[in-house]
Amino acid sequence: MANTRTVTVINGDGIGPEVMAATIRVLEALKVPLEFEHKDAGAEVVAKYGTNLPHETVEAVLRSGVALKGPTGTVVGGGLASANVGLRKRLDLYSSLRPVRSVPSIKTRYENVDLVVVRENTESLYTGLEHIIVPGVVESLKIITEKASTRIARFAFEYARKNGRKKVTSVHKANIMKLSDGLFLDCTRKVGREYPEIQYEEVIIDNMCMQLVKDPSRYDVLVMENLYGDIVSDLCAGMVGGLGLVPGANIGERTAVFEAVHGTAPDIAGKGVANPTALMMSAAMMLEWLELREESKRLQDALNTVYGGNQVRTGDLGGSATTREFTDAVIAAL
Ligand code: NAI
């Protein structure tokens, strides 16, 4: 096929292979000009490779520039860092992008939620740089740099510009962490001046949480450092029905990894009942990133049609459809 692009596919653990197979079926039904190169990562491949992130998997993503990934399990108490953290570091996937939109017929306390959380992925307290100073006293280091803060701010504003978004809100706690969050704020403010058509505002993180649960329609694109982003992105996912219904991507200068944000769901793995929606939505995001906009829209519209129909639902949403039945319905709606 002319102009066929390679996508690295990482099935992951638990329900990963099931939701991935469902998503690939839908992509094939869409006849996208993509070919899929399967590579391993996760807890279940450690015995084979001696690591949860084989070198050849990282090399494959560097070559293709884009990966679609299922959830990977973490070995609790083991010495290995998670495959996700490894991928983010090795590929310098500095931004986490999580669009959060209401899903038709999924009743929550909120209607018409349409937000995007842009989270800095490489620094802040989330890096876990901590040590014991003396027994009973632990120091945890929060690193904020001008370089990373400027880069994520630019990512957020560029995203807003390209996607016709009207406002970027910089979320911080600079009233208390005057130097670190103060630097983050300086950077987002400075970058914001280069985008006069986009409204810029600043909101303190605790107030942000309250405002979001009161009225999420006040916000558009939110940009913040790593730990705040970790928390706020799940809070926003909860507004539209939970982690099973939101897509995610980790994006760097040269590579991007698209993945559902839920975990490996070991309790239902292998039963053929997992909900593949989040990975399918992540695949729709990937298609858009690859500039296959029409195909992306068809996939998103098909998911909306299935949810709008109020009939085909997997067990997590109170229905009885299997992964295959749900996928058949999406393919029929394409
Ligand atoms: P989890 O998201 O796997 O499961 C929480 C609950 O949600 C379970 O009841 C599960 O059955 C349900 N669930 C999750 N995804 C579902 C789906 N697609 N369809 C239907 N039900 C679904 O979270 P948990 O149990 O905390 O983590 C399990 C493993 O996953 C851990 O090893 C964790 O480290 C890993 N994990 C990996 C992530 C990733 O690779 N992006 C993200 C989060 C967790």
Image (tube, rainbow, N blue to C red):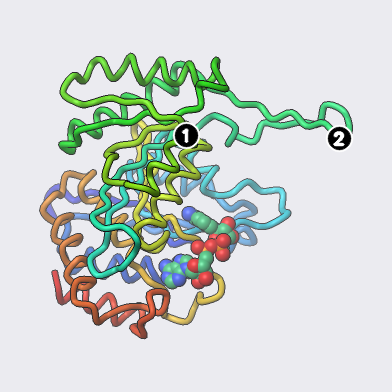
> Looking at the image, is mark 2 or mark 1 earlier in the sequence?
2
Along the horizontal axis of the image, is 228 left or right of 214?
right
Residue 171 sits above or below residue 107 on the image: above
Q: Residue furthest right?
A: 135
Which quadrant is home to the C terminus?
bottom left
Asked which quadrant contains residue 106, the reply is: bottom left
Please tell me whether mark 1 sits on a helix, a strand or a loop. Answer: helix
**Residue drawn at (20%, 60%) of the image:** 300
Please name whichever residue, 91 or 150, is drawn nearer the observer in this view of the structure. 150
**Residue drawn at (31%, 68%) of the image:** 107
* Residue type indicated by callout 1: Ile
In this view, the mark in front (2 or 1)? 1
Q: Measured from the top left, where is residue 254 in percent x and y?
A: 34, 33
Query: Which residue was labeled with disc 1?
Result: 205
Contact check, label 2 and label 1, Cβ < 8 Å: no
Query: Which residue was labeled with disc 2?
Result: 136
Please name whichever residue, 148 or 104, is drawn nearer the observer in this view of the structure. 104
Q: Residues within 10 Å of mark 2 (few under 14, many from 20)?
A: few
* Residue type indicated by callout 2: Gly
